[in-house]
């Protein structure tokens, strides 16, 4: 509370003006106090009665009766407003002389007089405090001697603030003197000042300020923002979390024109945006003139235009910048017409400006001239699939056909230009790379057909292409003749790939020719012998017609069956539909009133998809009863069922436009590997994770695959180390690949297909491993046997009988036995294979290090699960000693001697040294990688972890750095190295471990094991915040589906991260390429429904998802299944109609579900 009393002097005889007092207090008595002695003018202010007044004399009752906002009583006289306001004088300094003080007082009086005149012109509202009606020194005496100010005087400094008009002047400070906190504080203060009102205090400003405005006004701030001032810029001084970027410890210095030395950081900070714009534009212009054929310069120039557009709030300015960007890229394309990156960049710029029709015309024109570009075709197909308004399955299918035909013709053209098959061994040849890209597009077509619900067509396309490419007869045929011959095979009814009894196209053709020759020879023999050949029916067709007429008469007689109550079948169905509340006469697509019915429909649709994926033959359409729901078939129902069965038949006309020939073994193996992986088989990694085919495969996923789930479970277990057996949240949200085949598993189909493909790829241990896994899976599903019995033992033995020199098949079989706990059986198999290795051809002896490594790793894995660890370790050392010493293998009898260990160590060093020249030229093979791993494992067991790590470091120094990121063998070696580092993490320094993990992320950002290792190491040595920083950094640098999946798994493992999870989802689906990921959309939708429990947000996300990915039937059905309580029955019915319009394959009619419900009710 602040008490303030005012007083006035009534003596009008005094001619000179009253002296101003320092404090505006009223006197308490009518009699003025005697003036103090005039000893000094500086002590006159002490005579004010407020310094001698006793506050205890104020009655408390009076204080309580005063209202909180009592207005000041007006004076009886009307002349109070005309009285002069008091003038306050500052205490003069005693050091000044009397003349100087008098001159200062005169100047101050004149200044105050001018201010009072100005306020008089502006009116009463411009006074400092309009609520005060009486001031000290005025002649008006208020009704009370004091008042309580409960709001506070804005003019009084004791209330902690300046007067609102008293704004201090400012000047720029040197940014070097500011700390990071001062920078942030200065930035927030500027943002606050810029939001102040422009004309709020216009009444107290002079004419010059009113015209120009204050420094915080919008006019001035806009002026300063656009003029060439050197503003203070906030620079992120945090060090990068990714190694490989050079960060100097000392600041670089530069010398200015005046000779003063300035730091490079200071020069960068003082550069304004206008200066940067001019400098950067000048540099890019010069570089584009000096290096016109460097596509990176043009791409940087276009990216800088995007940066300029980001600073422009006006749409017209952004469009102008876009036009400039397009002109730059058009000039770049003129100079570099074959650059795919520049072509894609300019097409993306066209997409922001042009309409859809104009954009499609540009794409078609571009693909007409660059028909052999795999990358352009992939981007166009991805763009075309995501256009919801123009999406039709038939249209996309036709575009895939054009792409395959164009690329196939390009491959044939390269073959005609002189490429020989001997040159195809080099993976760098243009033909091999083009064929690999063609295989990727073909697999994308199969995946597209599968995701749109055309499962039989997807399986049929794989069958047709593998038969056409891998099992083509060894005949010199033209393309047209080859297609004619394949049509004969496809329509003959012979067993195809994956079916029981399949032989392959070439073998079937040979067998058919042999049968024809046998038949002809038999006929010739019969004609030569003569005689009676048996009875024959001369009228088979007529009798068949009689049987058909008899069946028809039976059907007609059934119409008068009394069981039908004299009602025809049509009338019976109509009666049932009317009981269900459906009027068939009004509209054939009457909406269903209950949303639960639509949910049951979606579940039935998913069930049929899991059952009906295998193509059927044309002659088997009439066989079997697929009408499970109808007992009485009408003619319409029979037509509907016949159409449904015909859609499951894959004719030659359905596949002939997509068939092509492959010359290189790399492309053929890629086709087979992706086929096995497509149907859920377990096969080793077939390409580098940095390859575009791998990145595209991850982007097109609809559910979590096994190669991702394994590492995601590691992240979940690490983050929840205190809780045992924590389920993976993402897996519970969207499921895994096995959910698709929960009713009809393709393991038998895969087993037959891989067994046939081994004829084209003999002694391929990757395919043999996939075959053994498929056999184990199929046998496990059929019957649950003893855990120690290997279900693949019979198959493995039969394969070994056919080829006893297949050493790697022995290793695959032995490892399979070890997984079932049969260690002794596995040792016998390994010992037999290694003992018989001597004397084999050199191409077989090359794989010996792989067999030794498998044997040693099996012993160590058994060592971890047994108490007698010393025995297993000695077995492993003995095995690796035989490999290092390069001596004939002998089964383990005793512990190796120190001399044997020394001889093996020297032998490993010599063998590793011999690999240096081959690795320098890029010839890195799987056997050499196995040798490095064996040498490192030997040092780990005999010397220690440091010697084992040195082996890996020496091996990586032999290969060129640029080859590491694109070599499958070097990637597998690095992941093995990372696993060793994680195993001995407690013995190593954190800096060493973190360096390896960071390099793994930098070289292989699309490998799931890189992220699982980072989370595992980060949870032990760093905070969660740093792990999040790394995830955020890679989301900006290397955005991929894997980054977001592991970041989401990391956040969902802990509670209280809802906002972070939501931000991650929104950031992912807002990315220009990742918003085509069905897996991310499904995770987002399931998270909002099951975890966040936000139905309105889930509804919005669902519509966004189907608009971005209209081809995914699984995504559409998620809306029916998860949003049945949110969407209305009318909306669900409309969604089904849209699915039919988009030509998504639907196998269940809603009336079937209605009749099921009616049957249950009855």
Image (cartoon, rainbow, N blue to C red):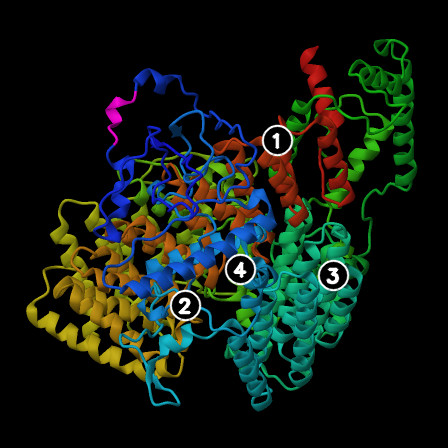
Q: Is residue 521 visible?
A: no
Dot 1: few (<14), some (14–19), or many (≥20) neighbours within 10 Å? many
Residue 174, image x, y percentages: 36, 70
Q: Mark 2 or mark 3, which has the lower sequence index? A: 2
Dot 3: few (<14), some (14–19), or many (≥20) neighbours within 10 Å? some
Residue 876, image x, y percentages: 19, 59
Q: Nearer the viewer, residue 944 or 316?
A: 316
Q: Is residue 79 visible?
A: yes
Which numbered disc covers residue 172? 2
Measure the C-alpha gap from mark 4 to mark 3.
Answer: 63 Å
Residue under circle 4? 214
Task: Left or right? Give the position of 1032 relative to 300.
Answer: left
Residue under circle 3? 399
Per the image, label 2 sits on a secondary structure element best described as: loop
Rendered position, 986 above or below 957: above
Query: Which of the 4 image quadrants contains residue 152?
Result: top left
Q: Mark 2 or mark 1, which has the lower sequence index? A: 2
- Nearer the observer: mark 2 or 3; the answer is 2
Q: Mark 2 or mark 4, which has the lower sequence index? A: 2
Residue in the image at 57% along x and 33% along y = 78
Residue under circle 1? 1123
Residue 87, image x, y percentages: 42, 48
Measure the C-alpha gap from mark 1 to mark 3.
Answer: 34 Å
Mark 1 touches mark 3? (CB < 8 Å): no
Q: Nearer the viewer, residue 508 or 129?
A: 129
Per the image, label 4 sits on a secondary structure element best described as: loop
Per the image, label 1 sits on a secondary structure element best described as: loop
Q: Which residues are magenta?
A: 53-58
Measure the C-alpha gap from mark 2 to mark 4.
Answer: 16 Å
- Nearer the observer: mark 1 or 3; the answer is 1
Q: Mark 1 or mark 3, which has the lower sequence index? A: 3
Q: Is residue 951 magenta?
A: no
């Amino acid at each position: 509370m602040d008490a303030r009393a005012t007083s006035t002097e009534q003596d009008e005889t005094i001619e000179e003006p009253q002296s101003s007092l320092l404090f505006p207090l009223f006197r308490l008595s009518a009699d003025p106090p005697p003036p103090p002695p005039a000893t000094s003018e500086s002590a006159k202010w002490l005579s004010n009665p407020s310094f001698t007044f006793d506050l205890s004399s104020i009655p408390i009752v009076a204080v309580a009766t005063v209202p909180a906002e009592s207005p000041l009583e007006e004076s009886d006289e009307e002349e109070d407003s005309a009285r002069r306001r008091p003038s306050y004088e500052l205490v003069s300094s005693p050091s000044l002389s009397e003349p100087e003080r008098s001159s200062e007082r005169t100047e101050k009086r004149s200044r105050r007089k001018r201010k009072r005149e100005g306020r008089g012109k502006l009116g009463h509202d411009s006074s400092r405090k309009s609520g005060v009606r009486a001031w000290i020194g005025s002649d008006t005496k208020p009704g009370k001697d004091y008042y309580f100010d409960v709001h506070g005087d804005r003019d009084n400094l004791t209330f902690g603030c300046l007067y609102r008009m008293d704004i201090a002047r400012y000047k720029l400070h040197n940014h070097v003197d500011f700390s990071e906190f001062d920078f942030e504080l200065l930035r927030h203060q500027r943002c606050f000042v810029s939001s102040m009102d422009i004309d709020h205090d216009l009444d107290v400003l002079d004419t010059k300020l009113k015209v120009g405005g204050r420094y915080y006004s919008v006019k001035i701030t806009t002026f300063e923002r656009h003029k060439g001032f050197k503003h203070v810029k906030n620079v992120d001084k945090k060090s990068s979390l990714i190694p490989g970027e050079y960060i100097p410890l000392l600041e670089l210095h530069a010398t200015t024109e005046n000779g003063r030395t300035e730091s490079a950081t200071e020069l960068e900070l003082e550069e304004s945006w206008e200066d940067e714009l001019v400098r950067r534009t000048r540099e890019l212009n010069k570089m584009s003139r000096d290096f016109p054929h460097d596509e990176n310069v043009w791409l940087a120039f276009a990216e800088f235009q995007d940066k300029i557009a980001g600073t422009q709030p006006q749409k017209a300015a952004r469009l102008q910048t876009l036009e400039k960007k397009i002109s730059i890229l058009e000039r770049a394309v003129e100079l570099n017409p074959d650059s795919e990156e520049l072509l894609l960049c300019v097409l993306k710029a066209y997409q922001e400006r042009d309409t859809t029709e104009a954009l499609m015309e540009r794409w078609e024109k571009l693909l007409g001239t660059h028909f052999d570009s795999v990358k352009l075709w992939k981007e166009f197909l991805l763009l075309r699939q995501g256009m919801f308004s123009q999406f039709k399955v038939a249209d996309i299918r036709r575009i895939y056909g054009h792409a395959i035909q164009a690329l196939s013709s390009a491959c044939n053209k390269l073959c005609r230009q002189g490429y020989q098959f001997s040159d195809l061994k080099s993976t760098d040849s243009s033909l091999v790379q083009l064929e690999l890209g063609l295989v990727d597009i073909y697999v994308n077509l199969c995946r597209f057909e599968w995701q749109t619900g055309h499962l039989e067509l997807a399986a049929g396309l794989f069958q047709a292409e593998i038969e056409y490419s891998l099992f083509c007869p060894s005949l010199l045929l033209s393309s047209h003749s080859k297609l004619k011959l394949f049509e004969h095979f496809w329509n003959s009814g012979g067993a195809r790939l994956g079916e029981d009894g399949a032989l392959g196209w070439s073998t079937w053709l040979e067998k058919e020719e042999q049968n024809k020759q046998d038949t002809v020879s038999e006929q010739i023999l019969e004609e030569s012998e003569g005689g009676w050949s048996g009875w024959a029916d001369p009228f088979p067709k007529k009798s068949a017609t009689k049987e058909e007429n008899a069946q028809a008469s039976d059907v007609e007689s059934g119409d008068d069956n009394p069981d039908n109550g004299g009602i025809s079948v049509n009338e019976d169905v109509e009666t049932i539909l009317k009981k269900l509340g459906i009027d068939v006469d009004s509209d054939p697509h009457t909406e269903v009133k209950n949303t639960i019915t639509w949910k049951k429909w979606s579940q039935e649709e998913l069930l049929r998809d899991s059952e009906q994926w295998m193509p059927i033959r044309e002659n088997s359409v009439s066989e079997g009863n697929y009408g499970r729901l109808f007992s009485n078939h009408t003619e319409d129902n029979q037509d509907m069922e016949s159409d449904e069965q015909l859609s499951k038949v894959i004719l030659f006309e359905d596949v002939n436009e997509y068939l092509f020939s492959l010359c290189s073994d790399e492309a053929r193996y890629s086709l087979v590997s992706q086929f096995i992986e497509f149907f859920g088989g377990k096969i080793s990694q077939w390409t580098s994770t940095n390859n575009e085919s791998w990145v595209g495969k991850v982007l097109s996923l609809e559910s979590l695959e096994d190669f991702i789930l394994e590492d995601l479970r590691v992240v979940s277990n690490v983050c929840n180390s205190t809780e045992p057996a924590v389920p993976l949240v993402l897996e519970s949200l969207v499921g895994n690949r096995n959910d698709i085949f929960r009713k009809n598993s393709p393991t038998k189909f895969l087993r037959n297909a891989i067994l046939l493909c081994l004829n084209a790829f003999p002694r391929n241990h990757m395919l043999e491993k996939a075959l053994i896994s498929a056999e184990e899976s199929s046998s496990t599903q059929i019957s649950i046997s003893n855990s120690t019995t290997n279900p693949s033992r019979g198959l493995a033995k039969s394969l070994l009988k056919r080829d006893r020199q297949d050493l790697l098949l022995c290793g695959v079989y032995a490892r399979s036995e070890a997984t079932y706990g049969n260690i002794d059986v596995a040792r016998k198999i390994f010992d037999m294979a290694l003992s018989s290795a001597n004397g084999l051809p050199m191409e077989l002896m090359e794989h010996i290090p792989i067999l030794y490594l498998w044997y040693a790793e099996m012993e160590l894995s058994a060592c971890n699960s047994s108490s007698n660890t010393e025995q297993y370790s000695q077995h492993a050392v003995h095995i690796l000693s035989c490999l290092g010493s390069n001596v004939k293998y002998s089964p383990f009898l005793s512990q190796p001697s120190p001399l044997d260990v020394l001889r093996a160590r020297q032998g490993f060093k010599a063998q590793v040294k011999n690999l240096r020249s081959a690795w320098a030229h890029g010839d890195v093979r799987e056997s050499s990688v196995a040798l490095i791993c064996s040498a490192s494992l030997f040092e780990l067991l005999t010397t220690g972890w440091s010697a084992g790590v040195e082996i890996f470091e020496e091996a990586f120094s032999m290969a060129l750095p640029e080859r590491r990121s694109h070599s499958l063998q070097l990637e597998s070696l690095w992941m093995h190295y990372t696993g060793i580092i994680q195993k001995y993490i407690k013995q190593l320094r954190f800096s060493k471990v973190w360096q390896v993990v960071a390099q793994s992320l930098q070289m292989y950002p699309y490998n799931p094991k890189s992220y699982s290792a980072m989370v595992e190491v980060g949870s032990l040595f760093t905070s969660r915040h740093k792990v999040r920083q790394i995830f955020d950094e890679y989301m900006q640098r290397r955005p991929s589906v894997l980054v977001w999946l592991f970041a989401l798994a990391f956040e969902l493992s802990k509670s209280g991260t809802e906002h972070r999870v939501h931000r991650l989802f929104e950031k992912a689906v807002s990315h220009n390429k990742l918003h085509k990921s069905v897996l991310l959309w499904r995770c987002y939708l399931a998270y909002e429904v099951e975890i966040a429990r936000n139905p309105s947000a889930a509804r919005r996300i669902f519509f966004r998802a189907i608009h971005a990915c209209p081809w995914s039937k699984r995504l559409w059905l998620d809306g029916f299944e998860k949003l049945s309580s949110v969407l209305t029955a009318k909306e669900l019915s409309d969604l089904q109609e849209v699915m039919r319009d988009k030509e998504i394959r639907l196998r269940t009619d809603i009336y079937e579900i209605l009749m099921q419900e009616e049957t249950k009710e009855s």
